[in-house]
Amino acid sequence: MISTARVPADKPVRIAFSLDNASDDTPSEDAIPLVFPELDQQLQPLPPCHDSPESMQVFKQHCQIAEEYNEVKKEIALLEERKKELIAKLDQAEKEKVDAAQLAREFEVLMEENRTLKLAQSQCVEQLEKLRIQYQKRQGSS
């Protein structure tokens, strides 16, 4: 006989089956391995009472729910791994963006320095040319 009682939702519930009237040809609880070894013990489907079709049906439903739970857990793990990968990619992209901005600033500084050096070089060439002319005039007059 199965008895039911109302229990508040926040209280843990423990369900136990009694196999007092079970015959010797039914497997014992020890003979039924853990159906889902990766599940916590409290989430494992309880062994059914083989004489009760209702118990067998509940056991099958529990197994299906446990299977769905495992699939969802695996999917969550995969999604968390994907999230980590995307965060790493985002971090890398942000780093590259910062690096690119830094390189652009350095490029501008170097371009300005290059313009300044070209101007100084052209002034030096001009000055050198003037000195040559002066030197040649001195050489010609002596």
Image (cartoon, rainbow, N blue to C red):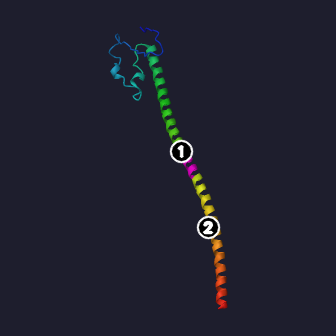
Q: Which mark is residue 117?
A: 2
Crowd around label 2: few <14 · some 14–19 · many ≥20 (10 Å): few
Nearer to us in this view, 120 or 77: 120
Instruction: Please name the predominant secondary structure of the magenta segment in the image.
Output: helix
Q: Secondary structure at mark 1?
A: helix
Q: Amino acid at mark 2?
A: Leu
The quadrant where residue 32 appears: top left
- Numbered range of the magenta stretch: 91-99
**Residue 9 included in the magenta stretch of the image:** no
* Label 1 environment density (alpha carbons within 10 Å; few <14, some 14–19, many ≥20): few
Quick one: quadrant of the N terminus?
top left
- Numbered mark located on residue 91 in the image: 1
Q: Position of residue 63 (x, y in %)?
A: 45, 23
Left or right for 78, reference 121: left
Indicate whether residue 95 is drawn in magenta: yes
Quadrant of the drawing holding the C terminus:
bottom right
